[in-house]
Amino acid sequence: MTEAPPKKPRTAAPATATQCYHCGEGCDRSLGQDDHYFCCEGCRFVYGLLQENGLCNYYELEKMPGIKVRGQFAAGRFAYLDNEDVQQKLLRFSDGKQQQVQLVLPTMHCASCIWLLENLHAIKPGVLQSKVAFSRKEVFIAFDPAQVTLRQIVELLAFVGYEPEIRLTDGETKRARKVDRRAWYKIGVAGFCFSNIMMLAFPDYFAGGRLGQETLKHIFAYASLLLALPVFFYSASEFFVSAWKGLRQRWLNIDAPIALSVLITFSRSVYEVLSGTGAGYFDSMSGIVFFMLIGRWFQAKTYDSFSFDRDYKAYFPLGVTRLSERGAEEPTTISQLRRGDRIAVRHNELVPADAVLQQGEGYIDYSFVSGENTPVHKRNGELVYAGARQTGGRIELEVVKAVSQSYITQLWNNNQAASRKNEEQSFIHPWSRYFTLGLFSVAAATGLYWAFIDSSKVLPAVSAALIVACPCSLLLSATFTFGNMLRHFGQRRLYLKNASVIESLARINTVVLDKTGTLTHTDEAEIDFSADPLTEAERNAVYSLVKESAHPLSRLLQKHLLRAGAQSLPLEAFTEQGGKGLEAVVDGRRLRAGSYAFIHGTADPAAAAGSAVWLSVDGAVRGCFDIRARYRAGVGPMIEGLRARGYALHLLSGDNDGERDHLRLLLGGDVTLRFHQTPQSKLEYIKELQAKGARVLMVGDGLNDAGALLQADAGIAVTENTSQFTPACDAILDASGVSLLDRFLAYARRGKHVVTASFILSICYNVVGLSFATRAVLSPMVAAILMPASSISIVTLVTVVTGLVARRIFRKNRGQIK
């Protein structure tokens, strides 16, 4: 049996406080085992489980690697996994002797997680194999259904801190995310053929087209022709398909001149080889295709790692507990819920559909639906909206609307906003259209001119014009600029849906911010006690009282007192009144903590302006804990940066207006502040701004922001973990990067300038090249050499420039960013 190695805390802690040996959270010394201390019984139990099975090497790979165990879940929480229909939708393979499942584990975070998850067979008999895909935060598990069930597997994972994310979308038939191997094959074929054709063309280039060995010249020419065939018919096929579709719709897209250039170059080269008049320009043709394919792949690759188009189904769990007419619990899938069904919702579970409370006391957390972080007390007969979380005990509700028809999902499915976003074209399209028309006009005029002057120069002049003025450098400049910018954004944890989002960000002139979870931390707060400081005995007593509650304010207060060195004391007669307060006898003194009305017995309108926890000791009011949101580091300078660049700022919050004065100081006196905002009112406010001509960026974090994120010209979803749930959006921003928002917008604007400058440079090059080609003094061979050279130079230039701009914007002081 492996003993757990002794470890030191990560940071120095007071003598009376320590860190949980399993998860690293702050804790007192009331729960100990083997000279180690734990924050809760759950963490201590998991430690004991690992120790009994000889798996304490888990603690050697990383310091305090565990996930805080939230306590034992209610019996039957995962009962829906016993349903055969659910199992068929989740299992990847089943033959009676072995079953296989692949689960998403959002809390997986380090090497210790991998080690533990790949040793599940040592904890649970019947687990045959478990394999982790860390980059996707997934685990593959093969197990013997005769010894262990799918439900038991999920319960084990949930208990040790790795609860799988099983959502409504998991039960649908969906296309697995696959790597587009065809793109790789096309790039590989084009690259292989291009490099070999270049090798075969070097002797002819160096000899100036007068290679002495005629036999070798013909061999090299025909070998190049054979190598060019797969490039023309396979790798370049998408350009011809795209150009043909555009022509059928009477639209000259930028693929049309590319396809024509490839066709002309290939045809001219085939003619020269078969007629024996030259070696052709297969290297240029294959180079065009190769570089274009690389550019398009580079631009699109970011989209594979994140899900930006999530709908309401990605939020709700797959299973739910339905009650029969006799009150018996029946696990079922959420998609089978109908109006009139009676359901049971337990502690910390989501309400899956709009429903009326029928039995029990609702203690509803709407923070992810409305933005209000104070739980709402609900009584029998009151409506509870889908997406809310029950933080109290078990309740029973009657469904009034199915999940697909609930209030929040109707808000989310804003098809009008989605179609409006798709209608706006990139600023690149007019350039490409005019360039295509201009190029065809010049080529036609050149052909007509030489048809009357010297017909022998028609084909060389037209071919040289189409080759030298190929729009590859024009298109590659945008492709590689935006592709490289996507990489720089991603390095700073802003993950854009695609390159067009960069253009949307560059056009923004109005920024709308959510408060809770966006500008502020979700699990930290600033706390002051508005009376004489607590004595050590009082601090220990209050800590012992609030640690027994799961209320969000109690959790914040518990962390605050623990950092002050509080220790746990035994308590008696503990009671909690949902939405009101706590009461217990600690060390012979009766303590009560809760709302103003709970302590004083009368309502106080002023107390509703902010979050506060009042305290009384033996019937005497001791004071009040004022709890304010803690703003993320760097938010102040970020706001100053946005204001300095001329962005109009607005704040929409579902929370109360308790911090109005502080936000005025932070955002400025001219900023519009709106509180108590519902999801619908946020969406309508965005529409009002757009009706006045504003280009709106919405930055939010919750389900309540989903409609506004979709309606805005660009929507950024802020999340503490980019692999976990985020609403439908155009970009996903790690919460640590909120302070860089002004710099992200500055970089987007600079990117558009880089593309514009590279376009102008490309057009200047094309004008110079055409001036020689149309006079028939530029041979197609020289044009074929200049074309890839210009493309490579443009790609190199924009790559270097975007890197330099990123380094300047993200490293210099804000005052130097313009």
Image (spheres, rainbow, N blue to C red):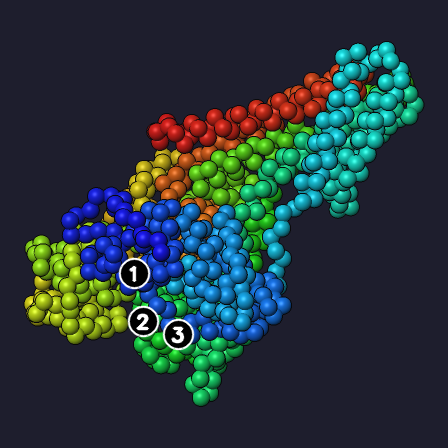
- Residue drawn where x is 51% and y is 44% of the image: 496
- Label 3 neighbour load within 10 Å: few <14, some 14-19, many 20+: few
Which is more toward the observer, 620 or 168? 168
How far from the left and from the top, in percent, is residue 394?
35, 76
Q: Is residue 448 above or below residue 25?
A: above
Quadrant in the picture for the N terminus:
bottom left
Q: Are marks 3 and 2 in contact (CB under 8 Å)?
A: no
| Residue on which the image places disc 1 | 44
* 204 sits left or right of 756 in the view: right
Q: Earlier in the sequence, mark 3 or mark 1?
A: 1
Q: Is residue 677 above or below residue 83?
A: above
Q: Earlier in the sequence, mark 3 or mark 2?
A: 3
Q: What's the amino acid at mark 2?
A: Gly
* 687 sits left or right of 426 in the view: left
| Residue on which the image places disc 2 | 392
Distance from label 1 to label 2 (Cα)? 24 Å
- Residue drawn where x is 22% and y is 63% of the image: 547
* 456 sits left or right of 306 in the view: right
Q: Is residue 272 above or below residue 694?
A: above
How far from the left and from the top, in percent, is residue 808?
42, 27
Q: Which quadrant of the figure has residue 246? A: top right
Which is more toward the observer, 805 or 203? 203
| Residue on which the image places disc 3 | 75
Q: Are marks 3 and 1 in contact (CB under 8 Å)?
A: no
Q: What's the amino acid at mark 3?
A: Ala
Tell me if residue 138 can be seen: no
